[in-house]
Image: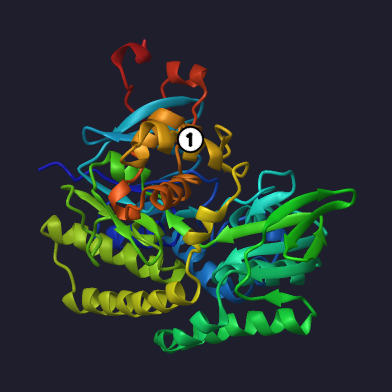
Amino acid sequence: MSAPAIVIVGAGPAGVRAAEVLAGAGLRPILLDEGDRCGGQIYRQPPDPRKRPYAKLYGTEAERARALHETFSRIAPEIDYRPRTLVWDVAGGQVMVHAGGGVGRIPYSHLLLATGATDRTLPLPGWTLPGVYTLGGAQIALKAQDCLIGKRVAFVGTGPLLYLVAVQYARAGAEVAAVIDSGTRAAQVANALGLLAQPKVALRGLGFVAELKRRGVPVLKGAIPEAIEQTADGLAVKLGARRFACDAVGLGYGLRAETQLADLAGVPRRFDAAQQTWVPESGADGRTPAAGVYVAGDGAGILGADAAELRGARAAFALLEDLGKPVDAAKTKTLEAGIARWARFRAAIDGMFPVPAAALAALPDDAVVCRCERITVADIRRVAALAKPEDVNRLKAFGRAGMGRCQGRFCGENAQAILAAITGAAPSALGAHRAQAPIKPIPLDDMTRVAPNTDPIVEEAAQ
């Protein structure tokens, strides 16, 4: 029998741990990484990692980052690692990739998607101004380029990442103008007991808040800014009668799973009410209803980087089980118990820092929702009144919200929440944006060339 063709998409914590398990079983998976080096977003490596010590790059996560990178170095000879490779479609048992100035297809018998997450943003007037970044974008600038998005930065949103990035910037020498958190003290106290599922992580988060206060940073709870304004000196975050002057803003209301490839692979999605977003249907073992397709890490639903390592390993064991390979049942039970603890912790976090989706209904007409197509709240309200769309895909067809280069990854849930407020329908009844290939733009000229180590998408492309 021929060896299974196993493709892993994503080389963050979940993808690396999945590759480790499979390589340990004597298999040689193909690990596709859009980045230059393994690590994903959370353990992203700069162009020259030797220039900065782990403690400076990753702070409290330094040892976990080091362990993941060392694991990758150890297994690298046993896997087929392909960096700078964008997967832009999944169809017919093949992944379509863009790499080396060309495109190609890679057949698979088993596909493990460890696609990670992107920032969840909420639109407000001024969020498209120069100097406004997502929290993830602010982190990339710091980790990958050793630079700040500004000298005086305001951080707006909610969730643990808000405080982590604010502390990282303060330690890097930035003046933090304010941390404005939409989560309320009441919600945080009410859900605090659930943090006992991961007490060390909870204490670390509390330490971040305490550090910001020791530095004299204003930390506001239960606050949603009205606007980000352009000023003669830079920017200002408007919150009632107060304005926080800054030259950059980091904005983020948690994370959302990257589900486009799972959708193209035939994996159904379900609406996660706690996180107000869509996630692939899967079990704790990473199996999905689509035969031969597994999901792991935050691409399967947001649980965090530590849980992503466990989920990557568990999905790989499920894959081995489906191949008829022997698997240590004790290991899989331990992994599932760990994942369950992180799920309990995440439920507490979701309760403490809920996405303030209701605030979208109160946005002014001129607020931009879809920045790719420059679609405003007024545009969505007008389409809803005239066309009466029954789901977000009809809203997209009539009004173009979600039709730009990001395909709704940043505006989809927001457009959905606004439409739900207008129609009175539950967000879960309005569906998710259907993924369309290519999920990210590809230079048209590259479509005429074949990527290295791939089959041509059409036979004529090889000639």
The answer to whether residue 328 is left or right of residue 456 is left
On screen, 397 above or below 177? above
Q: Classify 10 Å Cα crowding around label 1: few (below 14), some (14-19), many (20 and above).
A: few
Compared across the picture, whether 296 is left or right of 179 comes to left
Residue 393 image position (x, y, % from top left): 35, 36
Q: Residue at horizontal 38%, vertical 61%?
A: 297
Query: Given the image, on which type of amino acid does mark 1 rest?
Result: Arg
- For the N terminus, the quadrant is top left
What residue sits 44% from the left and 15% below the top?
448
Instruction: Tell me the quarter of the picture where residue 95 sits.
Output: top left
Quadrant location of residue 343? bottom left
Tell me where residue 375 appears, x and y as whole percent: 55, 35
Pick whichever, 239 or 329, lies toward us: 239
Residue 24 vs residue 416, the one in the foreground: 416
- Of all residues, the one furthest to the front in this rendering is 385
For image coordinates 17% across by 52% down, the residue present is 289
Task: Point out residue 201 in the picture as x, y percentages from the top left corner.
Answer: 51, 82
Identify the residue at the far right of this view: 232
**Vertical position of residue 56 compared to residue 263: above or below:** below
**Front in this rendered view, residue 402 or 298:** 402
Q: For residue 102, say whether it is visible.
A: yes
* Secondary structure type for disc 1: helix
Q: Which residue is mark 1?
A: 382
Image quadrant holding the C terminus, namely top left
The residue sitting at 50% across, 87% down in the picture is 189
Residue 436 is at least partly visible in this image: no
Reply above or below: 90 against 228. Answer: above
Q: Which color scheme does this rendered protein use?
A: rainbow
Q: How many marks?
A: 1
